[in-house]
Image (cartoon, grey):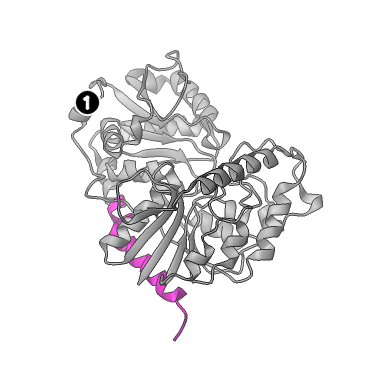
Amino acid sequence: MKVFHLSYSDSNSGASIAAYRIHRALKKNGVNSFMLVDNSFLDDSSVKTIKKNLVRIIFRKFKRLTEFLLLKFLKTKNNEKHSISFYPSGIVDLINNSDVDVVHLHWIQREFLSVKDIGKINKPIVWTFHDMWGICGCEHYTEEFRWKEGYFKNNRPSYESGIDLNRWNWERKKKFWKKPFQMVTASNWQTNCVKESALMGQWPVSTIPNPLDLDFWKPLDKDTSRKKFNLPRDVFLILFGAGTEHRKGFELLILSLKHLKKNSKSKSKKIELVIFGPHKNKILDNSLFPVHYLGDLDYSDSKLKTIYCAVDALVTPTRQESFGLTAAEAQACGTPVISFGVGGLLDIIDHKQTGYLAKPFDVIDLSEGILWVLSQNKNKKLSRRSRINALSKFSEDKISFSYMKIYNKSLPKT
Protein backbone atom coordinates (compact mmCIF):
# COMPACT_ATOMS: atom_id res chain seq x y z
CA MET A 1 0.00 0.00 0.00
CA LYS A 2 1.29 3.45 -0.94
CA VAL A 3 0.19 6.41 1.19
CA PHE A 4 0.74 10.02 0.24
CA HIS A 5 0.61 12.53 3.12
CA LEU A 6 -0.04 16.19 2.34
CA SER A 7 0.97 18.68 5.03
CA TYR A 8 2.06 22.31 4.89
CA SER A 9 5.22 21.41 6.82
CA ASP A 10 6.95 18.50 8.53
CA SER A 11 8.05 20.13 11.79
CA ASN A 12 7.28 23.84 12.34
CA SER A 13 4.08 23.43 14.40
CA GLY A 14 2.26 20.93 16.59
CA ALA A 15 0.10 19.86 13.64
CA SER A 16 3.04 19.30 11.30
CA ILE A 17 4.99 17.44 13.99
CA ALA A 18 1.99 15.16 14.54
CA ALA A 19 1.66 14.57 10.76
CA TYR A 20 5.33 13.63 10.44
CA ARG A 21 5.12 11.30 13.42
CA ILE A 22 2.14 9.49 11.88
CA HIS A 23 4.09 9.14 8.62
CA ARG A 24 7.20 7.89 10.41
CA ALA A 25 5.23 5.39 12.52
CA LEU A 26 3.64 3.96 9.37
CA LYS A 27 7.04 3.58 7.69
CA LYS A 28 8.37 1.75 10.72
CA ASN A 29 5.51 -0.70 10.34
CA GLY A 30 6.11 -1.44 6.68
CA VAL A 31 3.77 1.00 4.94
CA ASN A 32 5.11 2.65 1.76
CA SER A 33 4.49 6.14 3.14
CA PHE A 34 5.85 9.48 2.01
CA MET A 35 5.03 13.15 2.50
CA LEU A 36 4.64 16.17 0.26
CA VAL A 37 5.10 19.48 2.07
CA ASP A 38 5.50 23.12 1.18
CA ASN A 39 8.23 23.69 3.78
CA SER A 40 10.57 20.97 5.03
CA PHE A 41 13.00 21.35 7.92
CA LEU A 42 14.00 17.70 8.30
CA ASP A 43 16.65 15.64 6.57
CA ASP A 44 14.38 12.79 5.47
CA SER A 45 14.34 11.43 1.91
CA SER A 46 10.72 10.28 2.36
CA VAL A 47 9.64 13.92 2.73
CA LYS A 48 9.38 15.74 -0.58
CA THR A 49 8.82 19.42 -1.28
CA ILE A 50 7.18 21.00 -4.29
CA LYS A 51 9.85 22.07 -6.77
CA LYS A 52 10.10 25.84 -6.68
CA ASN A 53 10.97 27.85 -9.74
CA LEU A 54 10.80 31.65 -9.88
CA VAL A 55 7.19 31.70 -11.10
CA ARG A 56 6.04 29.34 -8.34
CA ILE A 57 7.89 31.33 -5.67
CA ILE A 58 6.29 34.60 -6.83
CA PHE A 59 2.84 32.99 -7.04
CA ARG A 60 3.19 31.53 -3.54
CA LYS A 61 4.01 34.94 -2.11
CA PHE A 62 1.12 36.47 -4.07
CA LYS A 63 -1.33 33.86 -2.72
CA ARG A 64 -0.33 34.41 0.89
CA LEU A 65 -0.33 38.19 0.58
CA THR A 66 -3.77 38.33 -1.01
CA GLU A 67 -5.19 35.90 1.58
CA PHE A 68 -3.78 38.14 4.31
CA LEU A 69 -5.33 41.23 2.69
CA LEU A 70 -8.70 39.53 2.10
CA LEU A 71 -8.92 38.51 5.74
CA LYS A 72 -8.62 42.18 6.68
CA PHE A 73 -12.21 42.58 5.42
CA LEU A 74 -13.35 40.24 8.19
CA LYS A 75 -13.54 42.08 11.52
CA THR A 76 -13.59 39.62 14.40
CA LYS A 77 -12.50 39.32 18.02
CA ASN A 78 -11.62 35.67 17.43
CA ASN A 79 -7.82 35.93 17.39
CA GLU A 80 -7.26 32.32 16.28
CA LYS A 81 -5.79 31.74 12.83
CA HIS A 82 -8.16 32.08 9.86
CA SER A 83 -7.53 30.53 6.43
CA ILE A 84 -9.39 30.91 3.13
CA SER A 85 -7.52 28.32 1.01
CA PHE A 86 -8.70 29.80 -2.28
CA TYR A 87 -5.92 29.58 -4.87
CA PRO A 88 -5.18 26.42 -6.88
CA SER A 89 -2.09 24.50 -5.83
CA GLY A 90 -1.19 23.03 -9.21
CA ILE A 91 -0.57 19.58 -7.70
CA VAL A 92 -3.99 17.90 -8.07
CA ASP A 93 -3.13 16.37 -11.46
CA LEU A 94 0.14 15.10 -9.98
CA ILE A 95 -1.82 13.39 -7.21
CA ASN A 96 -4.55 11.98 -9.45
CA ASN A 97 -2.08 10.61 -12.01
CA SER A 98 0.18 9.03 -9.38
CA ASP A 99 0.21 5.38 -8.27
CA VAL A 100 -0.66 6.17 -4.64
CA ASP A 101 -3.47 4.19 -3.04
CA VAL A 102 -4.54 6.69 -0.37
CA VAL A 103 -4.14 10.46 -0.04
CA HIS A 104 -3.77 11.41 3.64
CA LEU A 105 -4.46 15.07 4.35
CA HIS A 106 -3.21 16.87 7.43
CA TRP A 107 -2.87 20.64 8.06
CA ILE A 108 -2.90 21.98 4.48
CA GLN A 109 -3.53 25.72 4.92
CA ARG A 110 -1.38 28.79 4.12
CA GLU A 111 -2.68 28.33 0.57
CA PHE A 112 -0.94 24.97 0.22
CA LEU A 113 -4.11 23.23 -0.99
CA SER A 114 -7.36 24.99 -1.86
CA VAL A 115 -10.89 24.05 -0.87
CA LYS A 116 -11.65 23.32 -4.53
CA ASP A 117 -8.44 21.26 -4.91
CA ILE A 118 -9.50 18.94 -2.10
CA GLY A 119 -12.79 18.24 -3.86
CA LYS A 120 -10.99 17.45 -7.14
CA ILE A 121 -8.79 14.68 -5.70
CA ASN A 122 -10.04 11.38 -7.14
CA LYS A 123 -8.04 9.08 -4.87
CA PRO A 124 -9.44 7.77 -1.57
CA ILE A 125 -8.96 10.53 1.03
CA VAL A 126 -8.21 10.09 4.71
CA TRP A 127 -8.07 13.42 6.52
CA THR A 128 -6.61 13.80 10.01
CA PHE A 129 -7.95 16.97 11.64
CA HIS A 130 -5.43 18.90 13.72
CA ASP A 131 -7.88 21.73 14.50
CA MET A 132 -11.48 22.71 13.61
CA TRP A 133 -10.91 24.34 10.21
CA GLY A 134 -12.44 21.54 8.15
CA ILE A 135 -15.90 21.92 9.74
CA CYS A 136 -15.75 25.71 10.12
CA GLY A 137 -15.59 28.65 7.73
CA CYS A 138 -12.16 30.28 7.89
CA GLU A 139 -11.64 29.77 11.62
CA HIS A 140 -9.20 27.18 12.94
CA TYR A 141 -10.84 27.26 16.37
CA THR A 142 -14.02 28.92 17.53
CA GLU A 143 -16.18 29.01 20.66
CA GLU A 144 -19.25 29.82 18.53
CA PHE A 145 -21.57 27.16 17.09
CA ARG A 146 -22.15 28.11 13.47
CA TRP A 147 -20.25 24.94 12.53
CA LYS A 148 -23.12 23.03 14.16
CA GLU A 149 -25.99 25.05 12.72
CA GLY A 150 -24.62 26.08 9.35
CA TYR A 151 -23.30 29.53 8.47
CA PHE A 152 -26.32 31.77 7.89
CA LYS A 153 -26.89 35.52 7.76
CA ASN A 154 -28.86 35.53 10.99
CA ASN A 155 -26.45 33.56 13.23
CA ARG A 156 -23.31 35.61 12.86
CA PRO A 157 -21.65 36.39 16.23
CA SER A 158 -22.09 39.93 17.52
CA TYR A 159 -18.32 40.49 17.67
CA GLU A 160 -17.94 40.05 13.90
CA SER A 161 -18.50 42.63 11.20
CA GLY A 162 -17.36 43.38 7.66
CA ILE A 163 -17.54 40.73 4.93
CA ASP A 164 -18.73 37.38 6.29
CA LEU A 165 -15.81 35.40 4.93
CA ASN A 166 -16.57 32.56 7.33
CA ARG A 167 -19.98 32.01 5.74
CA TRP A 168 -18.54 32.38 2.23
CA ASN A 169 -15.79 29.83 2.88
CA TRP A 170 -18.17 27.36 4.53
CA GLU A 171 -20.45 27.59 1.49
CA ARG A 172 -17.45 26.85 -0.75
CA LYS A 173 -16.67 23.70 1.24
CA LYS A 174 -20.30 22.63 0.97
CA LYS A 175 -20.21 23.21 -2.79
CA PHE A 176 -16.93 21.48 -3.65
CA TRP A 177 -16.79 18.62 -1.15
CA LYS A 178 -19.44 16.39 -2.70
CA LYS A 179 -18.19 12.95 -1.69
CA PRO A 180 -17.60 12.09 2.00
CA PHE A 181 -13.97 11.73 3.11
CA GLN A 182 -12.82 9.35 5.83
CA MET A 183 -12.18 11.67 8.75
CA VAL A 184 -9.79 10.94 11.62
CA THR A 185 -9.38 13.00 14.78
CA ALA A 186 -6.95 12.65 17.65
CA SER A 187 -9.57 13.01 20.41
CA ASN A 188 -13.12 12.02 21.24
CA TRP A 189 -14.00 15.70 21.66
CA GLN A 190 -13.03 16.45 18.09
CA THR A 191 -14.77 13.34 16.79
CA ASN A 192 -17.96 14.56 18.45
CA CYS A 193 -17.47 17.97 16.82
CA VAL A 194 -17.31 16.30 13.38
CA LYS A 195 -20.42 14.24 14.15
CA GLU A 196 -22.32 17.34 15.29
CA SER A 197 -21.20 19.53 12.38
CA ALA A 198 -23.60 20.71 9.71
CA LEU A 199 -20.98 20.03 7.01
CA MET A 200 -19.64 16.56 7.87
CA GLY A 201 -22.14 15.17 10.38
CA GLN A 202 -22.95 12.15 8.19
CA TRP A 203 -19.38 11.40 7.13
CA PRO A 204 -17.32 8.51 8.56
CA VAL A 205 -15.03 9.55 11.39
CA SER A 206 -12.69 7.65 13.73
CA THR A 207 -10.61 8.62 16.76
CA ILE A 208 -6.90 7.77 16.64
CA PRO A 209 -4.47 9.52 19.04
CA ASN A 210 -1.23 10.96 17.74
CA PRO A 211 1.69 8.53 18.09
CA LEU A 212 4.87 8.92 20.13
CA ASP A 213 8.20 7.16 19.83
CA LEU A 214 8.11 5.77 23.35
CA ASP A 215 11.70 4.56 23.15
CA PHE A 216 12.64 8.24 22.87
CA TRP A 217 9.99 9.92 25.04
CA LYS A 218 10.80 8.23 28.34
CA PRO A 219 11.77 9.17 31.90
CA LEU A 220 15.29 10.46 32.64
CA ASP A 221 16.99 11.08 35.94
CA LYS A 222 15.46 14.23 37.46
CA ASP A 223 18.61 15.64 39.10
CA THR A 224 20.67 15.16 35.95
CA SER A 225 17.94 16.80 33.86
CA ARG A 226 17.77 19.81 36.18
CA LYS A 227 21.51 20.19 36.11
CA LYS A 228 21.51 20.49 32.31
CA PHE A 229 19.31 23.61 32.54
CA ASN A 230 20.78 24.99 35.78
CA LEU A 231 17.49 24.48 37.60
CA PRO A 232 17.37 24.21 41.42
CA ARG A 233 17.23 20.68 42.83
CA ASP A 234 15.38 21.22 46.13
CA VAL A 235 12.16 22.90 44.92
CA PHE A 236 8.93 21.92 43.17
CA LEU A 237 9.08 22.97 39.52
CA ILE A 238 5.90 23.63 37.52
CA LEU A 239 6.21 23.82 33.74
CA PHE A 240 4.01 25.59 31.20
CA GLY A 241 4.27 26.95 27.68
CA ALA A 242 4.49 30.63 26.85
CA GLY A 243 1.53 30.87 24.46
CA THR A 244 -0.48 34.00 25.24
CA GLU A 245 -3.37 33.45 22.79
CA HIS A 246 -6.88 33.50 24.28
CA ARG A 247 -7.35 29.78 23.55
CA LYS A 248 -4.21 28.86 25.48
CA GLY A 249 -5.70 30.31 28.69
CA PHE A 250 -2.61 32.12 29.94
CA GLU A 251 -4.63 34.68 31.89
CA LEU A 252 -6.49 31.81 33.60
CA LEU A 253 -3.13 30.40 34.66
CA ILE A 254 -2.14 33.77 36.15
CA LEU A 255 -5.35 33.88 38.20
CA SER A 256 -4.77 30.30 39.30
CA LEU A 257 -1.20 31.09 40.38
CA LYS A 258 -2.50 34.02 42.43
CA HIS A 259 -4.84 31.67 44.28
CA LEU A 260 -2.00 29.21 44.68
CA LYS A 261 0.16 31.91 46.20
CA LYS A 262 -2.55 32.77 48.76
CA ASN A 263 -3.21 29.15 49.68
CA SER A 264 -1.73 28.33 53.07
CA LYS A 265 -0.78 24.83 51.84
CA SER A 266 1.50 26.27 49.18
CA LYS A 267 3.52 28.23 51.74
CA SER A 268 4.96 24.99 53.07
CA LYS A 269 6.26 24.11 49.60
CA LYS A 270 9.06 25.71 47.65
CA ILE A 271 7.42 26.28 44.28
CA GLU A 272 9.09 27.75 41.22
CA LEU A 273 7.91 28.10 37.61
CA VAL A 274 9.57 27.02 34.37
CA ILE A 275 8.39 28.61 31.10
CA PHE A 276 9.30 27.33 27.62
CA GLY A 277 8.30 28.49 24.17
CA PRO A 278 8.96 31.55 22.02
CA HIS A 279 8.37 34.85 23.78
CA LYS A 280 9.80 38.32 23.10
CA ASN A 281 9.37 39.58 26.64
CA LYS A 282 9.19 38.01 30.05
CA ILE A 283 5.47 37.36 30.32
CA LEU A 284 5.50 36.76 34.07
CA ASP A 285 7.57 38.43 36.76
CA ASN A 286 8.80 36.93 40.03
CA SER A 287 6.10 38.53 42.18
CA LEU A 288 4.14 35.27 42.47
CA PHE A 289 6.86 32.61 42.28
CA PRO A 290 10.45 32.58 41.00
CA VAL A 291 10.47 32.04 37.23
CA HIS A 292 12.97 30.30 34.95
CA TYR A 293 12.71 31.19 31.25
CA LEU A 294 14.06 28.63 28.78
CA GLY A 295 13.09 30.16 25.43
CA ASP A 296 11.90 28.05 22.49
CA LEU A 297 14.56 25.33 23.04
CA ASP A 298 15.40 25.56 19.33
CA TYR A 299 12.44 23.21 18.73
CA SER A 300 14.67 20.36 19.91
CA ASP A 301 12.84 17.22 21.05
CA SER A 302 15.83 16.14 23.10
CA LYS A 303 15.84 19.40 25.05
CA LEU A 304 12.08 19.27 25.52
CA LYS A 305 12.27 15.70 26.81
CA THR A 306 14.91 16.73 29.33
CA ILE A 307 12.72 19.60 30.54
CA TYR A 308 9.71 17.31 31.03
CA CYS A 309 11.91 15.02 33.11
CA ALA A 310 13.32 17.92 35.13
CA VAL A 311 10.01 19.28 36.41
CA ASP A 312 7.41 17.93 38.82
CA ALA A 313 4.31 18.78 36.78
CA LEU A 314 3.13 20.33 33.52
CA VAL A 315 0.18 22.75 33.54
CA THR A 316 -1.83 23.31 30.35
CA PRO A 317 -4.65 25.81 31.06
CA THR A 318 -6.06 25.67 27.51
CA ARG A 319 -9.68 26.46 26.67
CA GLN A 320 -9.76 24.30 23.52
CA GLU A 321 -7.36 21.60 22.37
CA SER A 322 -7.77 19.06 19.59
CA PHE A 323 -5.23 16.73 21.19
CA GLY A 324 -2.60 18.02 23.62
CA LEU A 325 0.82 17.11 22.25
CA THR A 326 2.87 18.46 25.16
CA ALA A 327 0.61 16.70 27.66
CA ALA A 328 1.11 13.36 25.89
CA GLU A 329 4.89 13.88 25.66
CA ALA A 330 5.11 14.86 29.32
CA GLN A 331 3.19 11.79 30.44
CA ALA A 332 5.44 9.56 28.35
CA CYS A 333 8.34 11.06 30.32
CA GLY A 334 6.57 10.26 33.60
CA THR A 335 5.49 13.83 34.32
CA PRO A 336 1.93 14.36 35.65
CA VAL A 337 -0.22 16.93 33.86
CA ILE A 338 -2.76 19.41 35.24
CA SER A 339 -5.34 20.97 32.93
CA PHE A 340 -8.97 21.91 32.60
CA GLY A 341 -11.21 19.02 31.62
CA VAL A 342 -11.64 20.05 27.98
CA GLY A 343 -10.97 18.76 24.47
CA GLY A 344 -8.25 16.21 23.88
CA LEU A 345 -6.95 16.55 27.45
CA LEU A 346 -9.92 14.47 28.60
CA ASP A 347 -8.47 11.51 26.66
CA ILE A 348 -4.88 12.02 27.78
CA ILE A 349 -5.25 12.64 31.53
CA ASP A 350 -6.91 10.17 33.88
CA HIS A 351 -8.19 12.35 36.71
CA LYS A 352 -6.29 11.77 39.96
CA GLN A 353 -4.51 8.82 38.34
CA THR A 354 -2.02 10.47 35.97
CA GLY A 355 -2.75 14.10 36.79
CA TYR A 356 -5.64 16.41 37.50
CA LEU A 357 -8.59 17.64 35.40
CA ALA A 358 -9.95 20.88 36.85
CA LYS A 359 -13.50 22.07 36.25
CA PRO A 360 -13.55 24.30 33.14
CA PHE A 361 -12.56 27.14 33.70
CA ASP A 362 -12.35 27.20 37.49
CA VAL A 363 -9.03 28.82 38.34
CA ILE A 364 -9.35 27.90 42.02
CA ASP A 365 -9.80 24.24 41.12
CA LEU A 366 -6.79 24.47 38.80
CA SER A 367 -4.65 25.77 41.67
CA GLU A 368 -5.99 22.97 43.89
CA GLY A 369 -5.01 20.53 41.17
CA ILE A 370 -1.43 21.80 41.19
CA LEU A 371 -1.21 21.36 44.96
CA TRP A 372 -2.83 17.93 44.77
CA VAL A 373 -0.31 16.66 42.23
CA LEU A 374 2.66 18.05 44.16
CA SER A 375 1.45 16.45 47.40
CA GLN A 376 0.43 13.11 45.85
CA ASN A 377 3.49 12.40 43.74
CA LYS A 378 6.04 12.09 46.53
CA ASN A 379 6.26 8.32 45.97
CA LYS A 380 6.26 8.81 42.15
CA LYS A 381 3.00 6.84 41.81
CA LEU A 382 1.51 9.47 39.48
CA SER A 383 4.71 9.44 37.44
CA ARG A 384 4.63 5.66 37.01
CA ARG A 385 0.95 5.71 36.07
CA SER A 386 1.60 8.52 33.57
CA ARG A 387 4.23 6.44 31.82
CA ILE A 388 2.00 3.35 31.77
CA ASN A 389 -0.87 5.45 30.41
CA ALA A 390 1.31 6.74 27.56
CA LEU A 391 2.51 3.23 26.72
CA SER A 392 -1.09 2.01 26.45
CA LYS A 393 -2.39 4.93 24.36
CA PHE A 394 0.33 6.39 22.14
CA SER A 395 2.49 3.52 20.87
CA GLU A 396 3.51 3.79 17.22
CA ASP A 397 2.63 0.14 16.52
CA LYS A 398 -0.90 0.45 17.88
CA ILE A 399 -1.63 3.71 16.08
CA SER A 400 -0.10 2.52 12.79
CA PHE A 401 -2.32 -0.55 12.89
CA SER A 402 -5.39 1.65 13.47
CA TYR A 403 -4.50 3.79 10.44
CA MET A 404 -3.87 0.74 8.25
CA LYS A 405 -7.39 -0.48 9.07
CA ILE A 406 -8.75 2.94 8.05
CA TYR A 407 -6.77 2.87 4.78
CA ASN A 408 -8.04 -0.58 3.90
CA LYS A 409 -11.64 0.47 4.55
CA SER A 410 -11.12 3.50 2.29
CA LEU A 411 -9.91 1.54 -0.74
CA PRO A 412 -12.39 0.82 -3.53
CA LYS A 413 -14.02 -2.58 -3.27
CA THR A 414 -12.78 -4.92 -6.02
Residue reaching furthest top? 287
Q: Position of residue 297 (x, y in %)?
A: 34, 30
Q: Position of residue 215 (x, y in %)?
A: 21, 49
Q: Residues within 10 Å of mark 1 (few under 14, many from 20)?
A: few
Q: Residue at x 63, y 60 (%)?
A: 197
Q: Amino acid at mark 1?
A: Lys
180 or 272: nearer the eye?
Answer: 180
Q: Position of residue 34 (x, y in %)?
A: 36, 60
Q: Residue at x 43, y 44 (%)?
A: 14
Q: Position of residue 81 (x, y in %)?
A: 58, 41
Q: Main secondary structure of the magenta part?
A: helix
- Quadrant where the C terminus lies? bottom left
Residue reaching furthest bottom? 414
326 or 314: nearer the eye?
Answer: 326
Q: Residue at x 44, y 52 (%)?
A: 51
Please say whether residue 366 is one of the residues in the magenta stretch: no
Q: Secondary structure at mark 1?
A: helix
Can residue 176 be seen at all in this image of the molecule? Answer: yes
Residue span colored magenta: 390-414
Q: Does residue 342 lie above or below 249 as drawn?
A: below
Please tell me in which quadrant of the rendered image residue 186 appears.
bottom left
Residue that label 1 marks: 228
Q: Does residue 78 lie above or below 294 as drawn?
A: below
- Quadrant where the N terminus lies? bottom left
Please tell me in which quadrant of the rendered image residue 301 appears.
top left
Can residue 82 be seen at all in this image of the molecule? Answer: no
